[in-house]
Amino acid sequence: MQSLPKLRLGDMLVTAGVLSEKDLAWALDEQKNAFKRLGEVLLEANLVSEEDIAEARALQLDMPYVDLEDGVISSSVAALIPEQVARTYNVLPLAVSADRLAVAMVNPSDVEAIDAVQRHAKKRVEPVLASETRLQKTLDQIYGAFDSADIKASIKQAIEDVEFTADDQSQDADIAEERRQSGQAPVVKTVNLILQEAVKQHASDIHLEPRANCLEIRYRVDGNLHQVRNLPKQLQPAVVSRIKIMSEMDIAETFNFTGIEYPGLIIIADRYWDTGNANLEITVAHEIAHQWWYSLVGNDQVGQPWLYESLTSYSEYVYVRTVYDDKRAKEMQDGDRDWYNFYRGQGAPDLALDLPVSSYADNNYGMIIYVKGPLFYAELEQLLGRERFLDALQLYFERHRYEIVQSVDVLNAFEDATGEDLDALFYRWVGDFPGLDPAVVEQAQQQNQQVQ
């Protein structure tokens, strides 16, 4: 394509002879209705090639264009940046000089990508525009391609190896069978290949969604969910168990969960999706909040479950307040308060929040951690005022991101941010814990003895 005066993309393609005036007029009308870029419309209609658009864009930007099929890329030059950087930012080093590095890019205006390459290569980047498909193909040639046929073959072998279990088997037998099947080589390989494929596609998260006849797998790429493939229904128990084992979870399902959190991943019970359960919205909000209060700010989930579950449950109030209004959030809090008062009215113990899971009976655990816990934060917010409360919560997050916290860390963050003495309030709701003022604990215990 010879050099052209700077024009709009469509005009440049017409001038270059790869697009007709009639097709351009149609594409411009289609673009208005579809709310897409002109290039997307032209590609979807197969009116031009991806290389045609990339070459035209290079002329628009007054930037070199490279056809990656025309030459051989030096492995030593490619090695100037890690594979992870190359795949994350869709970039590939082409040539190097004393202080400069020519880099093939799909988006040459991506400042973050340029900065990342310059940090690793220690050279100034000179962007060269390339088409995305050929860049991806070249990256696969250099670093190793991922073949989806591997997954298909692995799935086929897994189906042959995984057996159906009788409905009248005992739970222990079912669990033992799931553990056996989840550890078989084809199942292990299938799960590993799915994870590898997601990484290759730059997926931020993976969704495994049980359907009536299959296990649907979707990847979120650039904020959008894409359906990738469906696994046969008989593989679902083994695949799910394999993921649990990789996450060091107990595969025995001893409770009827509605949602489960992992770092960067949430699982919602299929019965909620299939029936449109009224609690679906809050359940999703709860599990997403765990990406802060569990994934980013960690704690001993067995020894101190209140630290992440109670704050996550309080975040449900924040969600409702933000998406709807204060009135609806207050109604939600009042409902929890009524429910907890009813629970206490039946003679149930008012247990402290800072206790290990083993200290609670099943019903007590739910009421204390998921109801009393968020009500504690609601009272703290009412005492401090919303602005000061949120400032303290922000301090807690910033101070302890990527750390394992204790109860005293919550107390310290709220006291440091507000200048308030909150030991007595924490003792009344959370209980005694290391770091709490001993004088406050002693005084509270004396008062309790006098009451008794």
Image: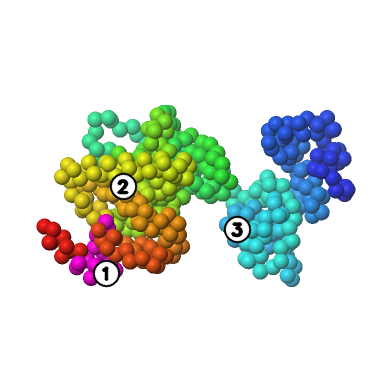
State the CA–CA distance, disc 1 to disc 3. Answer: 49 Å
Residue 101, quarter of picture: bottom right
Highlighted range, magenta: 429-443
The quadrant of the picture occupied by the N terminus is top right
Q: Which residue is mark 2?
A: 370
Q: Earlier in the sequence, mark 3 or mark 2?
A: 3
Quadrant for the C terminus in the image: bottom left
- At mark 2, the secondary structure is helix
Q: Mark 2 and mark 1: span between their CA atoms?
A: 26 Å
| Residue 362 circle label | none
Q: Kindly state the secondary structure of the residue where label 1 is placed.
A: loop
Q: Position of residue 407 (x, y in %)?
A: 32, 62
CB within 8 Å, label 3 to label 2: no
Residue placed under numbered mark 1 in the picture: 437
Is residue 266 visible in the rendered image? The answer is no
Determine contact: label 1, label 3, CB under 8 Å.
no
Question: Which residue is more in the foreground, 252 or 188?
Answer: 252
